[in-house]
Image: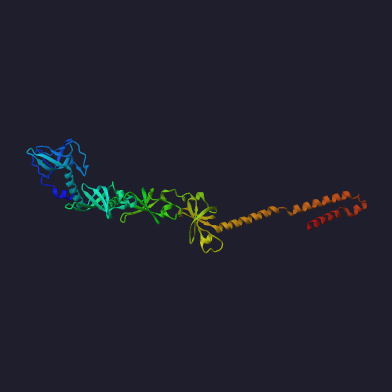
Amino acid sequence: MSEEVMVFGDQAPGSEDLNLGDAVPRLQERQIVKGTVVRIDTEGILVDVGAKSEGLIPPKEMTRRGEEVDAVSVGDQINVMVMRMEGEEGNIILSKKRADFIHAWDRIAQMKESGAILHAMVVDKVKGGLVVDLGVRGFVPGSHVELSQAKGRRFEWFVGQSIPLRVIEVDRGKGRVILSHRLAVEEDRKSRREEVLGSLVEGAIVEGTVKRITDFGAFVDLGGVDGLLPISEMAWTYIRHPSEAVRRNQHLRVQVLRVDKESGKISLGLKQILDDPWAEVSERHRAGEVVKGKVVRVVPSGAFVRLRDLDAFLPIAEMAERRVGKVEDVVEVGQVIEAMITEIRPEERRMLLSLRRMAREAERKRVKDYMRAQEDEGRITIGDAVGDAMGALLRQAAEARAEQPEPEASSVEETGPAESAVESEQAVESEQKE
């Protein structure tokens, strides 16, 4: 490769486009000219370069390393290098691959000067890096390969891929071109980041892909810029780790909460686009209601209890009548408990529970139930008792008289109605005492 560069060097004088209206110029060897394809056959490609005769590109001068450089058609304008002039008639032998080779070096040198990003195909993996095809051989050191794009972080993944590159060194004499994939990717990210940052508006709903999950949240790729989705903004209920709400490579719709264009920081929210369970909590629950839930989190001041799609708080002071030293002495994570709702504050997204109040209400209910049962068992009044006793005594007296003979008249008169009544009352009193 380096030998070809040294032989042909830079573009020779007079290689500028020709004006066919002028006198026929005299071509020089190693000169690069532009011509028009007039015929294609098995002998090669015939090209009109504005000379007395047309030039011929032999098949071997159309290919590079056994592959066709470019497919051409009749009428195409192409750059070619004058290889030699043959005979008095001036038969011209041309080469397209050598013209492309020189053009490739010129293009690479321009890219190096401007710092522009180019794309090239990775054709091989070698020790220490990647080989790319730029029209000349280019080398990407391993330290300049952005492995975040590679599956399994292996160089083999890049072979056959067209990747962005930035030229960092050109030595035409040695035929050496060094490029960086990492710098190109970083610059591309920076460009896209600025574009995305300029278009983001707080409150907007955007789409992105979860790229990385940490203990405090997840980073979401919004198409060139990453936004942070904090764990506190993932769900209306408490979650221990972001992996409970999102997964890597998951496609999400999120809301833009804050954008700091100076620092490039973007804060995102997921729960904001989900149904808010606190919006209708007053319709579903009321103070004094006893609910069942699972303890999902314990803190020194109390415990959070999951009630379907929201978390209520059970203060340590409301766990028992006695003083509680540690929350874990009464409840533990994973335990299902029943508690009474004591207060609901939808605007603060807060619901308070109490085990102590529930126990008190349960005790009051037991006392009321007991009193009611006692009243049901003792519902016979004194009047009812006296009446029943009097009736029983009168029946007994009637039966006794029926069994005895008729008394004499004098006896009846001695006892008389008044005495009989007194005796009856005394009998009733005696019965009551018994």
Residue 195 in the figure: left or right of residue 332: left
Horizontal and vertical percent for residue 290? 55, 53
Q: Does residue 204 appear in the picture of this structure? A: no
Which quadrant would residue 89 be assigned to in this image?
Answer: top left
Residue at (33% x, 52% y) in the render: 153
Residue 52 in the figure: left or right of residue 263: left
Residue 2 in the figure: left or right of residue 221: left
Q: Does residue 426 appear in the picture of this structure? A: yes
Horizontal and vertical percent for residue 164? 26, 49
Horizontal and vertical percent for residue 167? 22, 52
Q: How is the image coloured?
A: rainbow
Residue at (67% x, 53% y) in the render: 373
Vertical order, 155 against 91 (above or below): below
From the viewer's side, name the closer residue of 358 and 21.
21
From the viewer's side, name the closer residue of 110 and 192.
110
Which quadrant would residue 168 be assigned to in this image?
Answer: bottom left
Horizontal and vertical percent for residue 346? 47, 53
Q: Number of callouts in the render?
A: 0
